[in-house]
Every structure is written in structure tokens, then in C-alpha cells.
């Protein structure tokens, strides 16, 4: 799976996305993160959606690559 481009997300949202991701991994909810970082909860939701979308795209690309390899091995 491809890694998330945190630098682009940091530039897009003008915040430390790596810190937000680690807070989510620790189990903090959006309100706690918003209070600690000063980022609006709507912005946190957009960041989460961007991360989920990039994961979906990478999984889809991986799945397409696997199907292409199987088609080359067994064309029928």
C-alpha cells in the first residue's frame, strides 16, 4: 500500500497532519484533537476523508495490478 503524502496534506490544511494521525491512532476523538490543535472539527473530517480516499485508491490500484498479473498468467 502506498504511504499517505503527509506533506501535501499539511500544506493543504496548514496544520500538522502527522500529529493528528498519531492522535487518532492513540484513540482520541475529534473534539479532543480540535481542542489540542486548534483545528476545526469540519477540517478534521475533511482530513480523515482525504486519507480514506487515498487508501481506497491505493487498494484499488493494487487490486487492478493483481488482476492484470492473473490475466497475463492465465488468459482464459
Image (cartoon, rainbow, N blue to C red):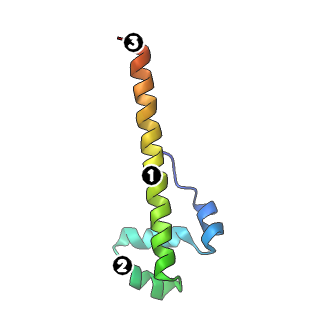
Q: Which of disc 2 and disc 1 is earlier in sequence?
A: 2
Q: Which residue is mark 3?
A: 75
| Pointer 3 local density, CA inside 10 Å: few below 14, some 14–19, many at least 20 | few
Give the mark nearest the N terminus, 3 or 2: 2
Residue occupying the far right of the picture:
11
Residue at image coords 47%, 47%: 57
Q: Relative to residue 6, is residue 62 depicted above or below? A: above
**Marks 3, 2: nearer the viewer:** 3
- Between the C-alphas of marks 1 and 2, the distance is 21 Å
Q: Secondary structure at mark 1?
A: helix
The answer to which of 4 and 68 lies nearer the viewer is: 68
Residue at (45% x, 64% y) in the render: 49
The relative height of residue 75 versus residue 4 in the rendered view (above or below) is above
Which residue in the protein does label 2 denote?
Answer: 29
Give the answer, above or below, for where 73 lies relative to 59.
above
- 4 sits to left or right of 60: right
SS at mark 2?
loop
Q: Quadrant of the C terminus?
A: top left
What whole-number distance in Å separates the C-alpha atoms at marks 3 and 2?
Answer: 49 Å
Q: Nearer the viewer, mark 3 or mark 1?
A: 3
Q: Which residue is mark 1?
A: 55
Query: Pointer 3 and pointer 2: residues touching (CB < 8 Å)?
Result: no
Q: Position of residue 33 (x, y in %)?
A: 44, 81
Amino acid at each position: 500500500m502506498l504511504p499517505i503524502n503527509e506533506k501535501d496534506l499539511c500544506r493543504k490544511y496548514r496544520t500538522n497532519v502527522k500529529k493528528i494521525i498519531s492522535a487518532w491512532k492513540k484513540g482520541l476523538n475529534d473534539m479532543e484533537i480540535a481542542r489540542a490543535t486548534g483545528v476545526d472539527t469540519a477540517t478534521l473530517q475533511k482530513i480523515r476523508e482525504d486519507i480514506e480516499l487515498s487508501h481506497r485508491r491505493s487498494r484499488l490500484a493494487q487490486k487492478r495490478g493483481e488482476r492484470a498479473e492473473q490475466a497475463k498468467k492465465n488468459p482464459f
